[in-house]
């Protein structure tokens, strides 16, 4: 344990051959970070500036992309700093805070995807009631709850972690995530139980709700005309792609990290990079290419830039 001014320091031990590839790591991470910020911000600005995109579906997409930006800002600046530093360390309170932001954004993504699934369900299955159900108040409530609920539940977990005794001070990863669990001297039953409850509340239940709504949409669309089926598939496919991508990310973060498998440091680092890259970068790509209205404005913007 390194102690300076009574502050417990935690070391990130997940970097492979950092002394050899320090500057390569920096260039790759910095490039990805700028790319993520630019891609997400561009689509958010398009939604913000074009009135025909001021609809619930696009507002939820903008919220999802803003969430991706916040997620990236939680991880990438610290990664860039660590790559150029001789020691890859962080104070334990800051580590808990990074974990709080990390899992708050993860939980918010599931709830935002659930809100988007409900919006599509009402739009396709109850078109006449859509303006009444998906009004401004409904949108605001969905957005506020999508960030408040994960923040509250994650803060409780942070309080539990702040009171545990640590016997290990080296994380197997490159940022503060689920691997904090392994720093405890004695594994806390309360933390384990609460972690499972939190996972069910902000991940499993929203995912089941999303699957239920899309099954309902497909069943109802199947009995409608061909044009309705095409519309349903076109609007639901991007959301399903994002859900699958994000679910794989959660699976890696929760299952693989907890099991402490015999993966080599290089393999673990590669999988970690994939999880922190695909989630914030694929979202704007999927919505930019698959959503017609966004794609149209994006093409106009690119033509103006040229």
Image (cartoon, rainbow, N blue to C red):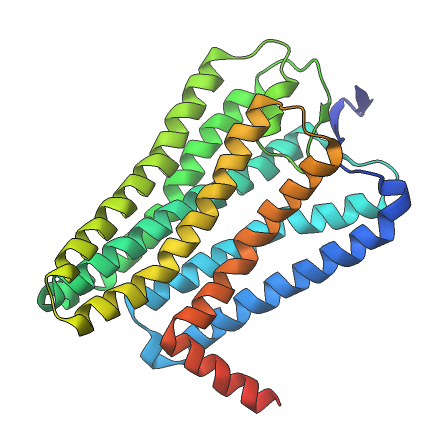
Answer whether residue 14 is visible to the viewer in this image: no
Q: Is residue 96 above or below residue 242?
A: above
Report x, y in % for residue 177.
59, 34
Answer whether residue 299 is visible to the viewer in this image: yes
Q: Is residue 305 left or right of residue 65?
A: right
Quarter assignment of residue 204: top left
Please tell me which residue is depicted at 75% across the width and 57% down the height of the picture.
Answer: 28
Please tell me which residue is depicted at 67% across the width and 50% down the height of the picture.
Answer: 76
Q: Is residue 18 left or right of residue 61?
A: right
Report x, y in % for residue 122.
17, 59
Quarter assignment of residue 196: top left
Q: Quadrant of the N terminus?
A: top right
Please tell me which residue is depicted at 42% across the width and 59% down the height of the picture.
Answer: 63
Q: Is residue 223 above or below residue 231?
A: above
Please tell me which residue is depicted at 76% across the width and 50% down the height of the picture.
Answer: 80
Report x, y in % for residue 214.
25, 52
Report x, y in % for residue 71.
55, 50
**Extreme top residue here?**
186
Q: Is residue 292 above or below residue 139?
A: below
Q: Quadrant of the C terminus?
A: bottom right
Picture mark count: 0
Q: Is residue 175 left or right of residue 124?
A: right
- Nearest the viewer among 168 and 274 is 274
- Nearest the viewer among 35 and 153 is 35
Q: Is residue 275 left or right of residue 91?
A: left
- Nearest the viewer among 175 and 22 is 22
- Nearest the viewer among 32 and 240 is 240
Q: Is residue 127 above or below residue 173?
A: below
């Amino acid at each position: 344990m390194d102690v300076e001014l009574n502050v417990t320091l935690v070391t990130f031990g997940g970097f492979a051959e950092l002394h050899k590839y320090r500057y390569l790591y920096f260039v790759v991470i910095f490039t990805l970070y700028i790319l993520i910020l630019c891609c997400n911000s561009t689509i958010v600005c398009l939604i913000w500036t074009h009135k025909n995109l001021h609809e619930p579906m696009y507002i939820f997409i903008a919220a999802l992309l803003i969430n991706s930006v916040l997620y990236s800002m939680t991880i990438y600046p610290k990664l860039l700093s660590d790559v150029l530093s001789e020691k890859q360390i962080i104070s334990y309170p800051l580590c808990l805070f990074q974990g709080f932001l990390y899992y708050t954004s993860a939980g918010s993504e599931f709830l935002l995807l659930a809100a988007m699934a409900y919006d599509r369900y009402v739009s396709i299955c109850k078109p006449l009631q859509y303006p009444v159900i998906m009004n401004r108040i409904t949108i605001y409530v969905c957005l506020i709850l999508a960030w408040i609920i994960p923040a509250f539940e994650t803060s409780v977990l942070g309080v539990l972690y702040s009171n545990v005794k640590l016997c290990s001070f080296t994380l197997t990863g490159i940022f503060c995530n689920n691997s904090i669990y392994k720093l405890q001297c004695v594994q806390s039953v309360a933390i384990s139980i609460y972690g499972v409850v939190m996972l069910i509340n902000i991940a499993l239940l929203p995912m089941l709700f999303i699957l239920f709504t899309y099954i309902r949409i497909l069943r109802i669309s199947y009995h409608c005309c061909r044009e309705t089926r095409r519309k349903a598939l076109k609007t639901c496919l991007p959301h399903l792609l994002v859900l699958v991508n994000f679910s794989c990310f959660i699976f890696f973060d929760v299952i693989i990290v907890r099991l402490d498998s015999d993966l080599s440091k290089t393999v673990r680092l590669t999988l970690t990079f994939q999880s922190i890259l695909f989630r914030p970068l694929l979202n704007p790509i999927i919505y930019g290419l698959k959503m017609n209205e966004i794609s149209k404005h994006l093409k106009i913007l690119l033509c103006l830039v040229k």
